[in-house]
Image: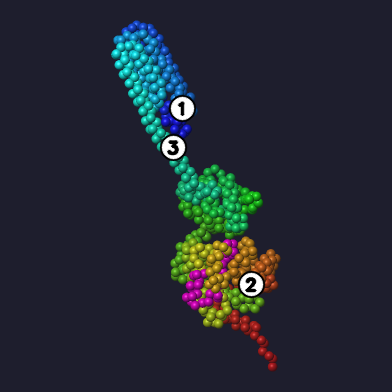
């Protein structure tokens, strides 16, 4: 039965058999000696033979030897190293002890005396029975002891002759068979019980190991090996609640999407793994580096000095990223933007500290990326305002507290008005004039961007109908839309419904999307396709501030390119700005794109732009943003003034 078991299971079973066999071995040896003494005294008192005393001395000496060997065995570790060998040795010693005991019935003349037979047979059978009871875990030991002893007793009874001897021999033989059978059954039951226990223990160990692996998987990001978002929340929540000091160092890889698009997603994964390795190396013991998802990472630092250590960690990380990474055998320059927020001295909500780290990270991005910013009082004011806008924008939108102003766009050579740009305004009762990007960002966060677009579309359609009444049918109005709105709603569908409701031709509305749409034309393709399908014109706003934009011009059907104001102001004396505008016009004009310069405020800049091939301008040089009625009045006055300026002089008499 043992041979059918696997090696680990057989070893475990053998250890259990050894442990059970040795559990009461000292008591067994003591009983063995006590029985030997009683047997020797019985024979010596009846027969006066000294041979039995020599046998007793040998039996006591051997029992003592066995006890000493067992003591040494328990302290040597042999049981764990080779339990099978221990069982074989125990069996050999049991056999030697049985042979020694078999001397009594075979070798001592006292056994031939009839009056000793019954007592001696009873003692021999009792000794064998006791050995079997003590060796139920391993029957070979009991059989090794009992076989020579009971065999010698049976042989002596057979040699004694007579019917009584034969009957007693037969009874002893039957008893021996029953005892040995009981020993074998006891061993089988022990093995069965131990096998169940071993299997249950093995299953429990396997489950424990599986649970540990599962727990590691649940807590670990599979790509980088760092902790994941779930584990971050567990650790960070505890750290924030304890109030002993905690800092979040939040960062992401600059322009990671461009790396994915130009090098492939496999290269992108390798970049993330390399960044994770740098982060793991830069972190100190006790810091928790985490991959939140995508290219976004965060480190949780704890302790009263967490703020200082987070800044030092950020500097180490940025210093390490100065060296190009080797990706697929090619060097690749990688940078990151880092935002840090720390809090010491009291508990803080994890969401609050995360929002502060987010604000610091966005400031780093706004400041040109590849830099580190620490959350400060100025950012706190901006964050407070952001939360206030989030709380009040839906109600302000419902109460129509927002309004739209219109800034003219003109042909710089003739001063002809070709269009207006609709500019969203919110004059907050206490915070003052809220910048349009802040309004749009709040609307996106609150999932009311569709309502905001509908509101602006309604004001633009009302403005266009007013222009129609002034016979200004050729003028187009542009509406700003952020590509960040596309996952939330479809601005094109919203504006289509508005134009249908107001009876306005969609071709008179131009949808301006920021240059973000150029970075990922595939992601924005569906919305850009709808813009074209519904008849709206498409303009790219803030052109020039992004990356590799000129190479993407042919990927999208564009009507207008608006050059960002940061390149226009002072361009008459800015050689680099002139080169940029010249490059844009050289590519865009042959493709049929109209180019509008934003932020034109000086005549010298306008003249320079015309020389560079930019025909249209928008800025305070031509007109400031105006409310609807004021814009219409301005247009009428502007037309009259332009008409008077180009009217022929009357002939002299």
Q: Position of residue 447 (x, y in %)?
A: 47, 63
Which badge, 3 or 2, comes first in the chain's sequence? 3
Pointer 1 local density, CA inside 10 Å: few below 14, some 14–19, many at least 20:
many
Q: Establish if 347 lies above or below 455.
A: above
Please tell me whether mark 3 sits on a helix, a strand or a loop: helix
Which is more toward the observer, 611 or 76? 76
Q: Residue furthest top?
A: 48
Q: Inspect this view and state whether residue 191 appears.
A: yes
Which badge, 1 or 3, comes first in the chain's sequence? 1
Residue range highlighted in magenta: 492-520
Q: Tell me the residue that label 3 is attached to.
A: 202
Q: Establish if 136 lies above or below 108.
A: below
> Which quadrant would residue 546 be assigned to in this image?
bottom right
Q: Real-space Cα distance between discs 1 and 2?
A: 90 Å
Instruction: Give the numbered dot on residue 83.
Output: 1
Q: Real-space Cα distance between discs 3 and 2?
A: 76 Å
Q: Any magenta on residue 559?
A: no
Q: Position of residue 632 (x, y in %)?
A: 54, 79
Q: Real-space Cα distance between discs 1 and 3?
A: 19 Å
Which is more toward the observer, 625 or 141? 141
**Quadrant the C terminus occupies:** bottom right
Q: Tell me the residue that label 2 is attached to.
A: 592
């Amino acid at each position: 039965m043992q041979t059918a078991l696997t090696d680990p299971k057989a070893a475990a079973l053998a250890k259990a058999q050894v442990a059970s066999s040795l559990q009461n071995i000292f008591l067994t040896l003591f009983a063995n000696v006590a029985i030997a003494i009683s047997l020797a005294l019985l024979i010596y008192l009846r027969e006066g033979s000294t041979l039995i005393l020599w046998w007793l001395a040998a039996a006591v000496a051997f029992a003592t030897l066995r006890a000493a060997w067992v003591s040494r065995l328990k302290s040597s570790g042999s049981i764990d190293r080779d339990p099978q060998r221990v069982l074989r040795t125990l069996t050999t010693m049991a056999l030697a002890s049985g042979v020694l005991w078999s001397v009594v019935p075979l070798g001592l003349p006292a056994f031939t005396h009839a009056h000793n037979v019954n007592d001696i047979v009873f003692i021999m059978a009792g000794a064998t029975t006791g050995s079997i009871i003590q060796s139920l875990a391993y029957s070979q030991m009991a059989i090794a002891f009992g076989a020579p002893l009971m065999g010698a007793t049976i042989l002596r009874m057979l040699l004694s002759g007579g019917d009584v001897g034969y009957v007693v021999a037969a009874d002893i033989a039957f008893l021996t068979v029953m005892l040995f059978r009981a020993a074998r059954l006891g061993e089988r039951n022990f093995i069965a019980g131990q096998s169940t226990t071993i299997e249950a223990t093995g299953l429990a160990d396997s489950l424990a190991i599986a649970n540990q692996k599962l727990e590691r998987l649940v807590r670990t990001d599979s790509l980088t090996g760092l902790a994941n978002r779930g584990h971050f929340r567990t650790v960070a929540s505890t750290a924030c609640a304890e109030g002993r000091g905690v800092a979040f160092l939040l960062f992401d890889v600059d322009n990671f999407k461009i790396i994915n698009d130009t090098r492939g997603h496999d290269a992108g994964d390798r970049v993330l793994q390399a960044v994770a390795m740098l982060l793991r190396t830069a972190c100190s013991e006790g810091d928790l580096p985490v991959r939140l998802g995508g290219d976004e990472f965060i480190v949780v630092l704890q302790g009263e000095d967490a703020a200082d250590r987070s800044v030092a960690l950020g500097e180490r990380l940025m210093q390490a990223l100065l060296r190009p990474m080797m990706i697929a055998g090619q060097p690749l320059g990688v940078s990151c933007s880092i935002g840090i927020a720390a809090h010491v001295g009291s508990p803080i909500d994890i969401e609050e500290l995360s929002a502060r780290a987010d604000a610091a990270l966005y400031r780093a991005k706004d400041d040109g990326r590849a830099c580190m910013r620490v959350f400060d009082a100025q950012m706190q004011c901006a964050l407070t305002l952001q939360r206030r806008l989030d709380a009040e924008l839906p109600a302000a939108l419902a109460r129509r507290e927002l309004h739209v102003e219109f800034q003219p766009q003109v042909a710089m050579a003739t001063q002809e008005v070709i269009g207006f740009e609709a500019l969203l305004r919110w004059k907050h009762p206490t915070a003052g004039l809220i910048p349009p990007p802040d309004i749009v960002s709040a609307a996106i966060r609150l999932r009311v961007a569709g309502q905001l677009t509908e509101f602006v579309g309604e004001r633009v359609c009302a403005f266009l109908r007013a222009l129609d009444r002034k016979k200004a049918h050729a003028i187009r109005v542009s509406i700003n839309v952020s590509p960040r709105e596309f996952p939330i709603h479809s601005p094109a569908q919203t504006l289509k419904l508005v134009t249908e409701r107001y009876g306005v031709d969609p071709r008179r509305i131009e949808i301006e999307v920021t240059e973000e749409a150029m970075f990922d034309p595939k992601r924005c393709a569906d919305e850009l396709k709808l813009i074209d399908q519904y008849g709206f014109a498409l303009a790219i706003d803030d052109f020039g501030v992004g990356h590799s934009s000129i190479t993407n011009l042919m990927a999208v059907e564009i009507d207008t390119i608006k050059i960002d104001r940061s390149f226009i102001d002072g361009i008459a004396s800015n050689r680099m700005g002139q080169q940029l505008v010249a490059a844009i016009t050289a590519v865009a004009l042959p493709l049929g794109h109209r180019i509008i310069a934003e932020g034109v405020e000086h005549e010298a800049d306008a003249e320079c732009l015309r020389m560079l091939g930019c025909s249209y301008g928008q800025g305070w040089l031509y007109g400031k943003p105006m409310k609807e009625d004021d814009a219409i009045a301005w247009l009428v006055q502007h037309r009259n003034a332009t008409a008077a300026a180009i009217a022929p002089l009357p002939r002299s008499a």
